[in-house]
Amino acid sequence: MFFRLPGAARAAAILLAAGFAHAAPLVQTAHVEAQLVSDQLSAQPGKPVLVGLKLRMVPEWHTYWKNPGDSGLPTRIQWELPAGWKAGPIQWPYPSLLPVGPLMNYGYEDDVVLLSELTPPTDAKPGPAHIKARAEWLVCKDICVPEKGELDLALPISAAPPRQDIRFLAHIQRAQEMLPLSLPGWKSEAAVVGKSLVVRISAPHGTALPAQATFFPERTELIEPAAPEKVARQGNDLTISMKLADPPPTDVTSVKGVVVTPAGWPGTDQRRAIEVDARKVASLPAVAGLTAASANDDGIGGSIVAALAFAFLGGLLLNLMPCVFPVLGIKVMGFVKHAHGDARAMRLQGAIFAAGVLASFAALAGVLLALRAGGAQLGWGFQLQSPAVVALLACLFFVLALNLSGLFEWGAFAQSMTSNLGARGRYADALLSGVVATVVATPCTAPFMGAAVGFTVTQSAGLALAVFVALGVGMAIPVFVLSLFPSLLKRLPKPGAWMQIFRQVLAFPLYATSAWLAWVLGAQAGNDAVLELLLGLVLLALGAWMYGRWAHAGARWQPALAVLLGALGLFVAWPVTQAAKAAAGAAQAEGEWQAWSPERVHELLAQGRPVFVDFTAAWCVTCQVNKRVALYDATVAKAFSDRGVARLTADWTRQDPRITEALAALGRNAVPVYALYTPGSDVPHLLPEILTPSIVLAEIEKLPAAHGATAITQR
């Protein structure tokens, strides 16, 4: 038996075991080499020993700090220790800024050692001891890969003073040098100034403070990591201003974090990081050029100019949306027809099209603001919340598609409705194209305009209209540029048989748009309304066929009958029973998804369950794509269940004032919006408008496991 060996033999056995203490197995993954390391070969009873999880990443890949920043997950360690041993928390080295596209993350590249103090009991007997740990980490480059490993380290107990292991001593020392210091005599305070968080660090008198510093908050979703920080020195004070997260947290009582400077802090032997535990105060003394400017920052990219820029970019991207492209295709086809003819007329058409778009956006924005001023709860895209508007648009697109397919021509009848001059008919068509494109485009703006619209409706009417007009300018500019520079179109073939094929091809996106609108109508008013719409479309098709077949045959009763059938089709398609159907048609979410209500959210949070709310609408194309790509993904669904997350659907397909109010409280005015509520916090975390499974999984993994599930706890 080991403990019955003579003293010399027992000492030799301990030293032999110590010789193998750091022959710990490596865990090798595709991107990380992981190992448990220590700075000494043995442990003494009752005395702590430093043990580290050493992660070595392949070049250009990184892992994360305890606050990962805009995305990512911190490394987690679950220790499996001998009886009586205790493990301290992870001692996090200061992180680096890791920009990834528009995001900013906090983490480590190359290699890092995450230290913890492990303490054996005071009555531990000399002999072998094995330290085990289960670790999980997220390693990222352009993509992110969750990895894990089970690690082991032999660390025998010995009464003799431990010897150092020179193989890992440098790694341990470097990790210790990267730990933030708590400096005696230094003070810190924090305050919210406008939409900024301001932290002030006060050093002892005569201390030469650095000119550059970066603040890394411990709390997630406190600031916008990607927003630039503003640093100012004034006497013995160093002030750092950061943009608050959107929506800003309301429960901040203190601010903890790490401040890093590349030059090293004075009196610390060039150590780069210090701890900050700042109490929150009502206000801080003004710092020239810093806090006043921070207080005036706007919530969209920091300025009104940024809101206008986002609106313009969103308008440009709208031209590629499936609900807009068919209308623009018809307009461009007209340009092709006239590209080799009257350039002046084409330029005028482009200007009238742009005017139609701008006037329509301004009118819709004006209606929205007027209704809001009157107390109505509406959001952007509200026109498609009306089943009547949806049905009429479906009929309009269907008739346009029939025309493009060649079932009928507008002929002299349409010409006489505009003017006896063909040119004037072109201009009326250009104006109508701009109006129709705007009406069907607005539901597609949410991925680009959700935050901007939510911002502008709280501002003055002039500023709100400016943002909406900027959206219209972005949408109208491609067609307008084509009209100004006909030479771009002259490279196309001259009008001929190919144009007929092009025209017929353009009909199919319009048919698809009509089908989508029928689906929206079904979500609003039920299957009976869809049947009425389809029957109305059949009558419209019959009337269009009769008009195309006999309009020029000389008889007057045949065109009149065609018009009568068209009117009858519109009457049948009109959702006259929408009110009754809406009352009976509260949509039930699929599977584990439940209907949203504020009361249900509070009830679930009171039960200690996190809540995920999907603010959606049937007419929102992005919403439906996100459901199929991410929210209904099997892996995501399992993660929701494993973490006990209740899933609620806030369906905004029909106007719902409570949902509109909830969106406004989140600083949004359009869907999709995805909010994750956690017990104990009144402010939800908002996910991006465009989802992938990895984005949702990353947020879910931040939650604790539900009762009965196995979880790796962070120390």
Image: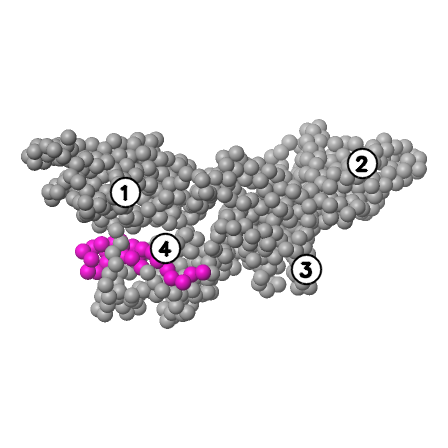
Residue named by callout 1: 112
Q: Quadrant of residue 6?
A: top left
Q: Which of 360 and 422 is in front in this view?
A: 360
**Residue 416 visible in rendering:** yes
Looking at the picture, tell me which residue is in the foreground, 549 or 543.
543
Between marks 2 and 1 in the image, the one whose residue lies nearer the viewer: 1
Q: How many marks?
A: 4
Query: In whole angstroms, how far apart are the C-alphas of marks 2 and 4?
Result: 61 Å
Secondary structure of the residue carrying numbered label 3: loop
Q: What residue type is labelled 2?
A: Leu
The answer to whether 191 appears left or right of 392 in the picture is left
Q: Can you tell which of label 2 and label 4 is closer to the viewer?
A: 4
Is 183 displayed left or right of 214 in the figure?
A: left
Residue drawn 62% across the image and 42% down it: 589
Sequence-wise first label, 2 or 4? 4
The residue segment tinted magenta is: 251-276
Q: Earlier in the sequence, mark 4 or mark 3?
A: 4
Q: Residue at x 23, y 42 (%)?
A: 51
Disc 4 marks a residue whose amino acid type is Pro
- Say whether marks 4 and 3 touch (CB < 8 Å): no
